[in-house]
Amino acid sequence: MGPVAATTYPGIRVTPPHQRAKRAPDYGRRERGYVYGALVPATGDVFTESYAGRTTVGWVDFLTRVDDWLPGSCQRVFALLDNLSTHHAELVTLFALAHPRWEFNFLPTASPYLNLIEPWWKVLRSLALKGKRFETWNDIVVAVRAATAYWNDHKHPFRWGQRRKTSRRSVTNPRTPGIRLPN
């Protein structure tokens, strides 16, 4: 997820229908950074780490931390990546050679919906950023860590394509599709 800037993230505010939503201007350039994340879809476990920049050294450091975070009993690690240049760097290739259980799979261009962590980024933004104002990058790092800890305490498996269950219409007033025939 990135870039994330130290700024105000508006929450949901109800306004009357005839008025437009108002927000105080947020002037100034403050610090910004990037949040990397790893998701285990079967269990819902998440690992996040924040970095000041998006560099190859930071990416390899993140991969090393994920490798330490994953249990040793995990024989294969499949990493789904976009085509960012830092994911193709020589240091990443050296990491892959040093860690044979890792397999890097690159997604086609313009297809983030294939990666299960993308919906989780929306959850993280909602838990960590929504409705808050951040003055420094460290405030964001603390909020992301707290949101990740909260998620891991209340986690659930992620399944691709699964949506929330909606309530069925009542049996007494079912809506029937199609054209109504005259009596």
Image: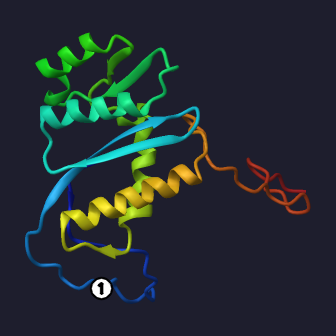
Disc 1 crowd, CA 10 A, few/some/many (<14, 14-19, 20+): few
Residue lying farthest left?
Answer: 29
Please, is residue 63 above or below residue 5 in the view?
above
Q: Position of residue 103 (x, y in %)?
A: 35, 15
Q: From the image, tell me which residue sits under label 1.
A: 22
Q: Residue at x 18, y 31 (%)?
A: 84
Q: Indicate left or right for 61 with 43 as reference.
A: left
Q: Indicate left or right for 181 with 160 as reference.
A: right
Please, is residue 130 above or below residue 82 in the view?
below
Q: Residue at x 41, y 55 (%)?
A: 124
Q: Residue at x 26, y 67 (%)?
A: 139
Here the colouring is rainbow
Under mark 1, the amino acid is: Lys
Give the position of the C terminus as an image quadrant: bottom right
Q: Position of residue 77 (x, y in %)?
A: 42, 20
Nearest the eye: 53 or 149: 149
Q: Position of residue 38 (x, y in %)?
A: 39, 37
Nearest the eye: 48 or 168: 48
Q: Quadrant of residue 159?
A: top right
